[in-house]
Amino acid sequence: MNAPPEAPLTESPHKGKTGLKRVWNALLYSMAGFGAAWKHEDAFRQESLLALVLIPLAFFLADAPLERALMIASILLVLIVELVNSAIEATVDRISLENHQLAKRAKDIGSGAVLIALINVLVVWGLVLFG
């Protein structure tokens, strides 16, 4: 019995790039992503501004390098999760703007992930400062 022929993969034409060209392209795409998030996502702007305040504050409030690292990492995690959540929301909106149970679920789960990351900041900072 013959297997059905496989459909050709349609990948980005940029996937074949290697070496410094790939790294350079990745940097440009990342910067475009930051710019898009800053322009279109209120939550990302708010969390970025919070990070601009809290990261320097971590250097003054933490006593040990590991404490500083944990405090800063917890804040950066919020930004990472917010970027992923924004990507999920944009993808869902690209597919359809109609109200759909699965679209709502995807967006709510992404939002829940951001909430957990924010709670993580509170826990880490609370333990470092008061623990």
Image (cartoon, helix red, strand yellow):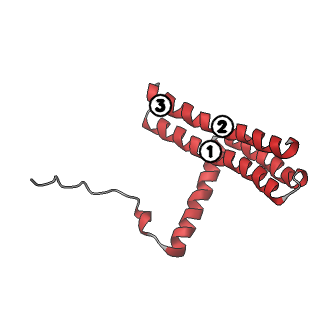
Is label 3 in contact with label 1 (beta carbons under 8 Å)? no
Going from N to C along the chain, the mark reached first, 2 or 1, is 1
Q: Which residue is mark 2?
A: 116
Mark 3 or 1: the one toward you: 1
What residue type is disc 3 on? Answer: Ala
Spatial distance from mark 3 to mark 1, Cα to Cα?
A: 18 Å
74 left or right of 125? Answer: left
In the image, is residue 126 above or below residue 19? above
Mark 2 or 1: the one toward you: 2
Q: Which residue is mark 1?
A: 81
> Would you call the spot at circle 3 few (<14 residues within 10 Å), some (14-19), or many (20 or more)?
some
What residue type is disc 1 on? Answer: Val
Secondary structure at numbered mark 3: helix
3 left or right of 130? Answer: left
What residue type is disc 2 on? Answer: Ile
Secondary structure at numbered mark 1: helix
Residue 103: mark: 3
The residue closer to the viewer here, 112 or 94, is: 112
